[in-house]
Amino acid sequence: MNRVGKTFGSVVAVFAEAGYGKTHFACSIANIQLKKNLPVLFLTGSRFRHCDSSEKYICEILHQSANTTIDDVFDSLDFIAYINKCKLPIIIDGLNETFPNENRWINELPSLVNKIRNRSNLLLITTCREKKDYVKTIYDCENFKDVENWIQLTGLYSDDLASTVQKYFDKYDIQPINHHILSDFSNPLLLKMFCECNKGLSSF
């Protein structure tokens, strides 16, 4: 994982190529919160595809009345986080998956960011493909590194690759003869798919 060398504050934008762990990263954060009995709000980008407004949709999925504003929702979430003495992550996984309406974020995301920054106990985490077209459409930037507070997921590093692959092989009861294939699995999704397809295989 690569990142800029500074404190991120209340907003983090996570980028990676397809299959390099954006959703796994987002789900891991949510899972850690839940295991600690702490609050988290996890949303998928695809759910915003056809809504009238991202702010209204967040109110709707939380079953708020029609006259409830996003400020009311964020105030409530901020208070819940305060009571639990934690930061409450609001995760939107896959901004690019709002396609073909992903351009909505260029106007709507800054508003969400500002409102979350105005609450001391909220944290916004978004994930997105690092493809130039998406970055331009969603953030109006030429490169994801021009986006404030970016993190790039780059797959498994060589130092961790052997041990990670072995853990997967042990879990799926895979016993390879050829041990020179590790470099093929720097993409976590490829490793997962390979293990699913070759469960119990003892020679390859």
Image: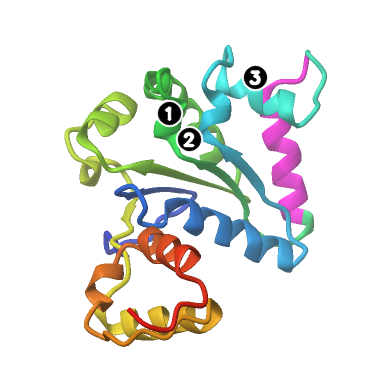
Label 3 close to label 1 by CB (< 8 Å): no
Q: What residue type is disc 2 on? A: Val
Residue 56: which disc? 3
What's the magenta region? 67-82
Label 2 close to label 1 by CB (< 8 Å): yes
Q: What residue type is disc 1 on? A: Pro
The image quarter containing residue 29 is: bottom right
**Residue drawn where x is 80% and y is 24% of the image:** 64
Q: How is the image coloured?
A: rainbow
Residue 113: which disc? 2
- Name the element at disc 2: helix
Residue 110: which disc? 1
Query: Seen in the image, is 92 located left or right of residue 80?
Result: left
Q: Nearer the viewer, residue 22 or 79?
A: 22
Q: Nearer the viewer, mark 2 or mark 3?
A: 3
Q: Residues within 10 Å of mark 3 (few under 14, many from 20)?
A: some
Q: Nearer the viewer, residue 56 or 153?
A: 153
Place of residue 190 in the rendered image (x, y in percent of width and height, measured from the top left): 36, 60
Is 195 colored magenta in this rendering?
no
Query: Seen in the image, is 85 located left or right of residue 171?
Result: right
